[in-house]
Image: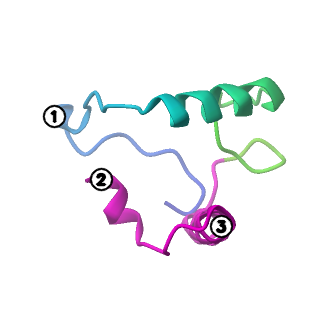
Amino acid sequence: VLGRVAPLKSDTSRATLPLSDELSRRLSDFRSIWRPNPAELLFATRTGRPLHASAYWRRLQLDLTRLGIPKRGTHAFRH
């Protein structure tokens, strides 16, 4: 929150999630252009800091639109 990395709420907050072949491929493609940053974040600002929630939200909505996927809230991605 507010551009900081926070710990998980509890030990049970960690989970293994299924990953489609398509998403795996896209993440692999992204990693090929990813620039390392001090916090080792996969998604960060240009200066390597964590994304602020509002920036993440804007980016998510733009990506969904670009991909032709109806806009959804972030909670929808938990399911």
Measuring from the top left, give residue 60's x and y in whole percent.
59, 64
Residue at 78 percent across and 24 percent down: it is 32
Q: Which element carries disc 3, helix, strand or loop?
A: helix
Residue type at mark 3 is Ala
Name the residue tied to disc 3: 55
Residue type at mark 2 is Arg
Name the residue tied to disc 2: 78
Mark 1 Cα shell of 10 Å, populated few (<14), some (14-19), many (≥20): few
Sequence-wise, the earlier of marks 3 and 1 is: 1
Residue at 29 percent across and 53 percent down: it is 78
Name the residue tied to disc 1: 12
Left or right of residue 73: residue 26: right
Sequence-wise, the earlier of marks 3 and 2 is: 3
Q: Quadrant of residue 20?
A: top left
Residue at 55 percent across and 51 percent down: it is 4
The magenta region covers 50-79
Residue at 64 percent across and 55 percent down: it is 51
Q: Select label 1 or label 2 by which is in front.
A: 2
Q: Which element carries disc 2, helix, strand or loop?
A: helix
In space, the residues marked 3 and 2 are separated at their CA atoms by: 19 Å
Residue type at mark 1 is Thr
Measuring from the top left, give residue 38's x and y in whole percent.
73, 28
